[in-house]
Amino acid sequence: MLPFIKKRTKIYEGKAKVLYESGQPGLIIQHFKDDATAFNRKKHAIIEGKGVLNNFISELIMDKLSGIGVPTHFVRRLNMREQLIRRTEIIPLEVVVRNIAAGSLCSRLGLEEGLVLSRPIVEFYYKNDELGDPLVTDEHILALDWAAPHEMNSIVNNALRINDFLTGLFSGIQLILVDFKLEFGRVEDEYGETQVILADEISPDSMRLRDSRSGEILDKDRFRKDMGGVKEAYQEVARRLGVLPKDILNGIIPPDGETEN
Amino acid sequence: MLPFIKKRTKIYEGKAKVLYESGQPGLIIQHFKDDATAFNRKKHAIIEGKGVLNNFISELIMDKLSGIGVPTHFVRRLNMREQLIRRTEIIPLEVVVRNIAAGSLCSRLGLEEGLVLSRPIVEFYYKNDELGDPLVTDEHILALDWAAPHEMNSIVNNALRINDFLTGLFSGIQLILVDFKLEFGRVEDEYGETQVILADEISPDSMRLRDSRSGEILDKDRFRKDMGGVKEAYQEVARRLGVLPKDILNGIIPPDGETEN
């Protein structure tokens, strides 16, 4: 008999993750790859063990967010690289929350990196690689029916709650949350009503984190800026969050690719 | 004695207009040039008589908007190319209202030209040539203190009222208002309170207009797309609005440049 892995059906392969059928209704498997990309795939590399670290970090954060009542797609971690999640209809938006000016905000608006914003900025980008994920406003989203007004309210409210919670979580481990990206998806509840829940992942791939004492960069910017030490930075975040797997610490990194459940 | 024109002080020279001191407190002179530019000044030409036509068209529209209670900077037309306006502190935003998809909306979001939007879209662009007038959201505007929340409310309300009014005005003369751009500025009222009023101009330079029967383009898109007949299109809009000056009709176009009051 063939091992279970051969029977899995791939639903979607993205830049850093793969989705598989789980065989259970309403549930799918999210697999974290070691691939790192930036600038709309113009830059690509393999960061050994990154997928494992993001799997553990995202598990911890999604779990804590459920704890404060933010609905998420996360069900449970399956193994070193995979987690069981709810199948959602992804809303085609990247929701970015910014506390400090960095990255594209600075280049687009001529702001200095590190400017502390007088209030958090919530931005929406249309998820479309071909168009370079363009910035959009509520107006575009509503006029083009990408999300309904009550869904936008729920997204903004949850994005700001997540920002408050994560800013607190990271400040306790001497990390500054500069900005982060979220994705949301629709699920049907038991009454057939659609609900918007947090999807995707929350990891150093989707956040900017700085050490609050040294200012050291501990996220994907190390990759974007060719600074090296990417793996070590992700490990340091996992270590401070208390989720650095012993195997990783001992240099035993489960290979990427098809893994068993 | 030198003619009056020599004593005027230039306050600001833009792509299509020049502002001069008027000698009267709180009032300045807005001069309409024949210069046409597009794609952030990458394209430039002189359209003979355009400044005259825009001066008359903008006068008519600003006047009608005052009539429905939209506060504007327009005081009175002085001559063929100039009008007296209130001095305002310009809010650094281009406010675009769109009824039908065209131009940058299509290229940024991959939409088809001519798509009728399910509701009008109000967009804000940060007025900054160096940065290419980037799209911004309420979030950027508020976090960076470019306008206050009550000012944004007033801008959006007036932009939507202007859209309703102009859509009606143009539909009466067989023109479809595809989209248009507005600028707003602050003035102090008699009690020292600041108020936001409509500034700049409203003309075929700042609107997209199509003939409702033939679909013919009657605005600056003729220049952007190298279609020729720019002057004739602007004249046709002025003619339908009933403000085509007889001199222009007879081919007598007052020269651009310093003109007397």
Image: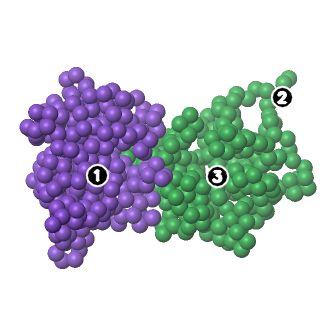
Chain colours: A purple, B green
Q: What's the chain of the residue with tag 1? A: A
Relative depth, front residue between B55 and A20: A20
Disc 1: which residue: A17
Do marks 1 and 2 both belong to one polypeptide chain? Answer: no
Q: Amino acid at mark 3?
A: Ser
- Can residue A187 be seen here? The reply is yes
Residue B19 location (% of width, % of height): 67, 36
**Gap in Å between the C-alphas at discs 2 and 3?**
33 Å
**Gap in Å between the C-alphas at discs 3 and 1?**
45 Å
Residue at image coords 14%, 33% = A251
Disc 2: which residue: B3
Quarter of the image for residue A152 reads: bottom left
Q: Amino acid at mark 2?
A: Pro
Residue at image coords 35%, 66% = A148
Q: Secondary structure at mark 3?
A: loop
Relative depth, front residue between A169 and A24: A24
Relative depth, front residue between B133 and B4: B133
Q: What's the chain of the residue with tag 3? A: B
Residue A17 location (% of width, % of height): 28, 51
Disc 3: which residue: B206
